[in-house]
Image (cartoon, helix red, strand yellow):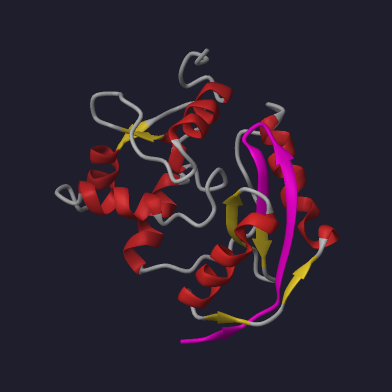
């Protein structure tokens, strides 16, 4: 199924480096770690894979409320997000992502706990796969999912970013 939508894109600076944010009229649909100039090919590939067609327009005004919430989060002034989302994914992925949104700020859960929560206790690897496909990291806090032994495992943006986010939230001690 192909969807014809206008996709608005802009960049923002963050403690993680530059973030490229994409949204439609419906809501945020993608956050990429890196500058637009460096991620434009992967963004086009992602849009194509999701069956999304339409214009991609750089628009600071449209993305301002989203960037503002992210800036507040990074400044320690916000512990949750209330921006609308426009997610593409399987029903299983969406179920996992909705479960991730329930993990409180500064808390962590294991992949196994998430698998149990979604009613698929043996699907730990599938939970990891859904986490990896999360199109809006930070807003859907996949960084709050860790290994059963408490170790940092897997994060699309890199473990250094996961550690920084968990440290920012006070879930782990600051890594030097």
Instruction: Please identify the residue farthest to the left as the structure is shown.
Output: 122
Foreground pick, 79 / 73: 73
As for residue 11 lying within the magenta part, the answer is yes
Question: In terms of image quadrants, where is residue 10?
Answer: bottom right
Foreground pick, 38 / 122: 38
Instruction: Please identify the residue farthest to the right as the structure is shown.
Output: 61
Q: Position of residue 16 (x, y in %)?
A: 62, 35
Q: Position of residue 49 (x, y in %)?
A: 46, 74
- Is residue 118 visible in the rendered image? The answer is no
Residue at point 67%, 64% (across, down) = 23
Picture layout, residue 30 above or below residue 115: below
Residue at point 17%, 47% (across, down) = 121
Query: Main structural element of the magenta stretch: helix, strand or loop?
Result: strand
Picture layout, residue 63 above or below residue 68: below
Q: Position of residue 57 (x, y in %)?
A: 76, 71
Left or right of 111, for residue 57: right
Picture layout, residue 48 above or below residue 141: below
Residue at point 56%, 84% (across, down) = 3
Residue at point 68%, 51% (across, down) = 35
| Span of residues in magenta | 1-20
As for residue 88 lying within the magenta part, the answer is no
Q: Position of residue 67 (x, y in %)?
A: 74, 47
Left or right of 49, for residue 62: right
Question: In terms of image quadrants, where is residue 144?
Answer: top left
């Amino acid at each position: 199924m192909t969807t014809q939508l206008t996709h608005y894109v802009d960049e923002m600076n963050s403690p993680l480096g530059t973030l490229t944010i994409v949204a439609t009229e419906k809501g945020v649909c993608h956050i990429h770690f890196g500058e637009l100039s460096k991620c434009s090919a992967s963004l086009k590939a992602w849009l194509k894979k999701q069956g999304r067609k339409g214009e991609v327009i750089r628009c600071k005004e449209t993305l301002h409320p989203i960037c503002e919430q992210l800036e507040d989060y990074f400044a320690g002034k916000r512990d949750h997000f209330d921006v609308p989302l426009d997610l593409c994914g399987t029903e299983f992925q969406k179920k996992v992502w909705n479960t991730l949104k329930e993990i409180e700020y500064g808390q962590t859960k294991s992949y196994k706990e998430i698998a149990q929560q979604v009613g698929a206790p043996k699907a730990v690897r599938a939970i990891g796969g859904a986490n990896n496909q999360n199109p809006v990291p930070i807003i859907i806090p996949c960084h709050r999912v860790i290994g059963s032994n408490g170790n940092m495992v897997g994060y699309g943006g890199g473990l250094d970013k996961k550690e920084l986010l968990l440290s920012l939230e006070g879930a782990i001690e600051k890594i030097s």
